[in-house]
């Protein structure tokens, strides 16, 4: 394998990592966006640097240019190590003050060693990108940074391994995350060791055949360790669990409580004596019986009618949209959502994953924004019944109410429309 080919392969691995992290960040927009962005950016920068360096892996490039490109190529890797150390220092390493201090200042050590190698490369340029050619001993001065990388990665490994071996672990996810990060740290420590081995190998006086064979093995090991270690780090990143993450989720939950409280307060002010929609109220309860709606479905329908009533008097649906968005983000986090419920006498009285108000929010916004026919035919019976009631009570915009009550064929399922019409007839006969 030529050295240029090797560098292109490394660039491809890093670019694939960038795509995977970016895809995950788009799928889970609320999952540690700053850390995912940093991880994606570092991988993209690494792919660009390695691809750029492959262009100069020939005898035509001057030693000075090769030395500069070689040192610049190392920036993403060193930055990634420093960033991992910084994340550790502000999270699980807090339990180890000395380790936290060292990790917090790791960027100084790595940065100083990288700067030393860069300056040496300017004054003592070497054919740094000609892996299989003769390399002078001063090349090792460019590689002082590998020693700093090795020390920091060893410390990272010790911290992650310590967390993995702890008996008290908050959850299986945390243990799995620590396991992935420990394995990744082992791979990257071995990678740094392989860097040092390869550097020494290049300056040794060996026969061309022997040197070529050993360097080939060194490059294959490097590629394998980077690929496997990168996958393990991504797994740990996707499982990332920390004090900051818990605080972020708690902040989201506090916001949800406030938004829901604001809407419930409006309900209490507007409907202190119950749902007051004139004759339509009687039609609604009788139709619920005909349709055999459960108490939960009935509550969802009532909440939908109330929301439409509020939107009629206060057309700004920002509060409702925000509540819906926050609730969805909380519900997607199964670990938190599964713990947010009220249980009395063995019965679950409230579960955030099945909140009636949340279920009513999306249909309310759609009806209010004149998108009735886009979803009503495919919606549940309770949604359609609530829409009929709101139209009869005058809570909907005139065009939407007209479609529901006058359009033929109406955008309502036949059984729901029939139940509502029968309820109307029965209610009038009982007066």
Image: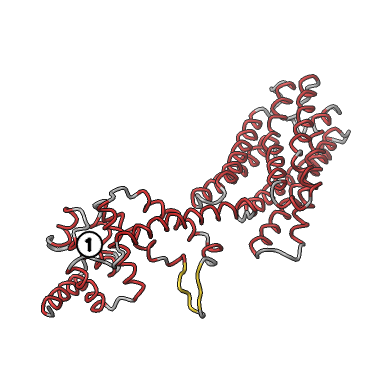
Q: Residue furthest right?
A: 205
Q: Nearer the viewer, residue 386 or 313?
A: 313
Q: Quadrant of the N terminus?
A: top right
Residue at point 68%, 41% (across, down): 83
Q: Secondary structure at mark 1?
A: helix
Measuring from the top left, give residue 318's x and y in whole percent.
Answer: 36, 48
Residue 346 vs 197, above or below: the answer is below
384 sits to left or right of 194 = left
Measuring from the top left, give residue 288's x and y in whole percent.
Answer: 26, 75
Q: Nearer the viewer, residue 59 or 164?
A: 164
Residue at point 50%, 71% (across, down): 342
Q: Residue furthest top?
A: 123
Measuring from the top left, give residue 353's x and y in whole percent.
Answer: 46, 65
Mark 1, residue position? 390
Residue at point 68%, 51% (across, down): 228
Task: State how the image is colored.
Answer: secondary structure
Badge 1 crowding class, 10 Å Cα cut-off, few under 14, some 14 to 19, many 20 or more, is many
Q: Nearer the viewer, residue 178 or 248?
A: 248
Measuring from the top left, give residue 29's x and y in whole percent.
Answer: 50, 49
Image mark count: 1
249 sits to left or right of 349 = right
């Amino acid at each position: 394998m030529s050295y240029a080919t090797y560098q292109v392969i490394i660039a491809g691995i890093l670019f694939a990592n960038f795509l995977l992290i970016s895809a995950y960040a788009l799928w889970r927009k609320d999952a540690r966006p700053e850390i995912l962005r940093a991880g994606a950016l570092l991988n993209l920068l690494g792919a660009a640097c390695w691809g750029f360096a492959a262009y100069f892996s020939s005898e035509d490039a001057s030693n000075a240019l090769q030395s500069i490109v070689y040192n610049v190529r190392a920036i993403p890797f060193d930055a990634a190590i420093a960033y991992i150390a910084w994340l550790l220092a502000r999270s699980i390493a807090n339990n180890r003050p000395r380790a936290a201090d060292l990790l917090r200042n790791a960027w100084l050590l790595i940065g100083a060693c990288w700067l030393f190698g860069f300056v040496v490369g300017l004054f003592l340029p070497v054919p740094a990108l000609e892996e299989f050619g003769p390399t002078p001993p001063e090349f090792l001065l460019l590689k002082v940074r590998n020693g700093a990388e090795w020390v920091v990665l060893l410390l990272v490994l010790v911290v992650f391994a310590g967390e993995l071996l702890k008996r008290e672990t908050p959850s299986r996810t945390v243990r799995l995350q620590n396991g992935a990060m420990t394995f990744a740290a082992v791979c990257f420590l071995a990678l740094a060791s392989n860097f040092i081995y390869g550097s020494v190998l290049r300056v040794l006086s060996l026969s061309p055949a022997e040197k070529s064979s050993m360097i080939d093995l060194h490059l294959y090991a490097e590629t394998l360790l980077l690929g496997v270690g990168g996958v393990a780090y991504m797994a740990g990143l996707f499982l990332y669990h920390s004090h900051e993450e818990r605080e972020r989720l708690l902040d989201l939950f506090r916001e949800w409580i406030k938004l829901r409280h604001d809407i419930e307060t409006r309900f209490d002010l507007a409907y202190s004596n119950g749902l007051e929609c004139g004759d339509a109220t009687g039609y609604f309860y009788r139709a619920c019986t005909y349709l055999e709606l459960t108490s939960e479905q009935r509550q969802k329908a009532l909440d939908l009618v109330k929301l439409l009533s509020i939107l009629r008097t206060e057309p700004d649906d920002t509060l409702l949209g925000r509540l819906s968005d926050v609730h969805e983000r909380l519900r997607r986090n199964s670990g938190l959502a599964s713990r947010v419920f009220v249980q009395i006498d063995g019965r679950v009285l409230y579960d955030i994953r099945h909140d009636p108000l949340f279920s009513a929010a999306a249909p309310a916004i759609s009806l209010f924004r004149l998108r009735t026919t886009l979803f009503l035919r495919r919606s549940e019976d309770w949604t359609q019944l609530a829409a009929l009631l709101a139209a009869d009570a005058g809570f909907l915009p005139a065009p939407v109410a007209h479609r529901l009550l006058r359009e033929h064929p109406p955008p309502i399922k036949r059984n729901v429309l029939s139940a509502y019409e029968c309820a109307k007839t029965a209610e009038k006969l009982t007066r």
